C-alpha cells in the first residue's frame, strides 16, 4: 500500500492537472425570456378529418391551458390536403366550405378569438355532427357570423386558404 504522503502528493498533483485551481469560474448567463423568439408552430389540418378535429380540440387546447401559448407563434391552416395551390378536399365539398369558413376566421380575428371557434367546430366534427350543427359555434364563442359570411362570399377565405 502507498504511504499517506505519496497519496496526498498524488491527489494534489491530479487535482492540479484535472482542474486549474487558479482559473476563474465560467458563468453562463441565459438570455432573458423577452430576448428569445417564440417557437413558430404551423398546424395544417382538414376541418372534417376526425383525427385533425381530435388534435385541435383535445391536444392543441393544452397549450392554452398550460400557458405554453405565451412562447408559441401559432398559425393554423385549414388546408384540406392542399397540393400545388389547389385545394382538394378529401372529405368533400362540405370540408371545402368549412375550410374556407375557418380560413376567414383565422384571417380576420386574432388567435384568442378564432381558436375557440375552431375548437368548437372541432368538437362537433369529433362527434360527427358537422352538417349544420357547428353553426351554433358562432353564438357559443361570440363570433360575428356576418363578418365570416361576408368573407366567405367575397372569396377572400378561399384566397387566403390557397
Image: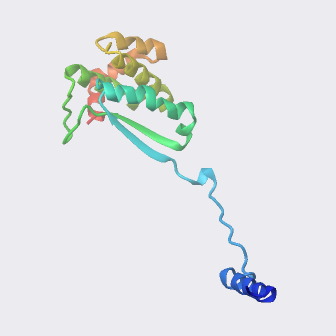
Position of the N terminus, as image quadrant, is bottom right
Q: What residue is at 74 percent from the left and 82 percent from the top?
A: 11
Relative side of 12 to 156, left or right: right
The colour scheme used to paint the residues is rainbow
Nearer-the-camera pick, 21 or 130 = 21
Q: Quadrant of residue 156?
A: top left
Q: Residue 32 at what x, y percent from top left?
A: 64, 54
Q: Residue 142 at what x, y percent from top left?
A: 49, 16
Q: Residue 148 at what x, y percent from top left?
A: 37, 21
Identity of the residue furthest to the right in this view? 5
Res. 51 visible in picture: yes
Q: Quadrant of residue 158?
A: top left
Nearer-the-camera pick, 89 or 138 = 89
Relative side of 24 to 62, left or right: right
Q: Residue 12 at what x, y percent from top left?
A: 75, 84
Q: Quadrant of residue 50?
A: top left
Residue 139 vertical placement versus 32 (above, below): above
Residue 123 vertical placement versus 85 (above, below): above
Q: What residue is at 19 percent from the left and 22 percent from the top?
A: 92
Nearer-the-camera pick, 34 or 62 = 62
Residue 108 vertical placement versus 16 (above, below): above
Q: What residue is at 37 percent from the left and 38 percent from the top?
A: 43
Residue 84 vertical placement versus 35 (above, below): above
Amino acid at each position: 500500500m502507498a504511504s499517506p504522503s505519496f497519496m496526498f502528493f498524488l491527489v494534489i498533483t491530479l487535482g492540479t492537472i484535472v482542474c486549474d485551481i487558479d482559473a476563474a469560474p465560467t458563468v453562463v448567463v441565459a438570455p432573458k425570456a423577452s430576448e428569445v423568439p417564440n417557437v413558430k408552430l404551423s398546424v395544417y389540418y382538414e376541418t372534417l378529418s376526425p383525427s385533425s378535429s381530435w388534435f385541435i380540440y383535445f391536444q392543441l387546447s393544452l397549450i392554452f391551458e398550460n400557458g405554453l401559448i405565451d412562447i408559441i407563434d401559432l398559425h393554423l391552416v385549414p388546408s384540406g390536403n392542399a397540393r400545388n395551390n389547389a385545394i382538394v378536399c378529401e372529405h368533400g365539398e362540405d370540408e371545402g366550405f368549412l375550410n374556407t369558413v375557418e380560413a376567414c376566421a383565422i384571417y380576420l380575428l386574432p388567435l384568442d378569438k378564432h381558436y375557440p371557434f375552431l375548437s368548437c367546430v372541432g368538437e362537433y366534427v369529433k362527434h360527427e355532427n358537422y352538417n349544420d350543427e357547428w353553426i351554433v359555434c358562432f353564438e357559443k364563442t361570440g363570433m360575428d357570423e356576418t363578418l365570416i359570411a361576408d368573407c366567405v362570399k367575397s372569396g377572400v377565405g378561399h384566397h387566403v386558404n390557397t
